[in-house]
Image (spheres, helix red, strand yellow):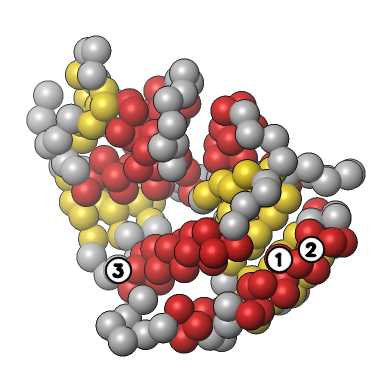
Amino acid sequence: MRVGESPAQESASRTVLMVDDDPDVRTSVARGLRHSGFDVRVAATGKEALRLLSNESHDALVLDVQMPELDGVAVVTALRALGNDIPICVLSARDTVNDRIAGLEAGADDYLTKPFDLGELVARLHALLRRASHSDQQSDTMTVGPLTIDTARRLVFVDGERVDLTKREFDLLAVLAENAGVVLSRQRLLELVWGYDFDVDTNVADVFISYLRRKLERDGLPRVIHTVRGIGYVLRDEP
């Protein structure tokens, strides 16, 4: 939010797609978001959401996890596979670690458990939109050894050759590059990249590090992502 800008001004002209198969929830949340200044469109199914997102521009997506036919996790997975980076907050009536992990690992940016306070949803949407806006405005490139990372265009080059990364792979590499030379623990990576602000037993960080290494260190290229045994990982251009 800019200095002097009210929450309603921050929401102005921002279009949110609200997706939930429960008409009462859909109507209630949409009404509350409109009252907070958002332009809101609604969908009752995952398929309808994908159709709307492919045909119209939206700034954020609020998505229920439990829906018939195509659930919320499947919608998130499909969007990220298409390269759609829209900020996504998923909703679920189930408050279990596995449910949260499923949504976040699919590519969602935030998670709320029903029932929730509308004010919290609005605050989280504002945070997601500010983060997305900052990312769009970022024009710096980061260079670490043979790597060049263009954060504005979300492009990565190794010795001048472009390497295609998924959204999550890019996010992970960007965090490592922003902290080049600093050892980041697995838990810290889970917080910064996946948004896990809770204790969780998962090897997802290790899995995605292996994905990055296959793409960045192929054909005899030097190792740039180093393992610090018992702690985590560090990005640096020297052994």
Q: Which mark is residue 138?
A: 3
Q: Residue at x 35, y 51 (%)?
A: 156
The residue located at (47%, 68%) in the rendering is 126
Question: Tag 1's secondary structure?
Answer: helix
Q: Residue at x 48, y 64 (%)?
A: 123
Judge the density around disc 1: few (<14), some (14-19), many (≥20) Cα neighbours within 10 Å: many
Q: Quadrant of the C terminus?
A: top left
Report how far apart the C-alphas of labels 2 and 1 lie in the structure. Answer: 6 Å
**Amino acid type, callout 2:** Arg
Give the structural element (helix, strand or loop) at label 2. helix
The circle on residue 26 is 2
Q: Is residue 38 left or right of residue 233?
A: right
Which quadrant holds the N terminus? bottom left
- Residue 144 vertical placement versus 233 (above, below): below
Marks 1/3: CA distance?
A: 32 Å
Foreground: disc 2 or disc 3: 2
Q: Which residue is mark 1?
A: 29
Q: Is residue 113 visible?
A: yes
Q: Nearer the viewer, residue 144 or 23?
A: 23
Say which mark, if any, is on residue 218.
none
The amino acid marked with disc number 3 is Gln
* Residue 80 seen by the camera: no
On screen, 79 above or below 100?
below
Give the number of the mark in front: 1 or 3.
1
Q: Are marks 2 and 1 in contact (CB under 8 Å)?
A: yes
Q: In the rendered structure, which disc, 1 or 3, sits on the residue that comes first in sequence? A: 1
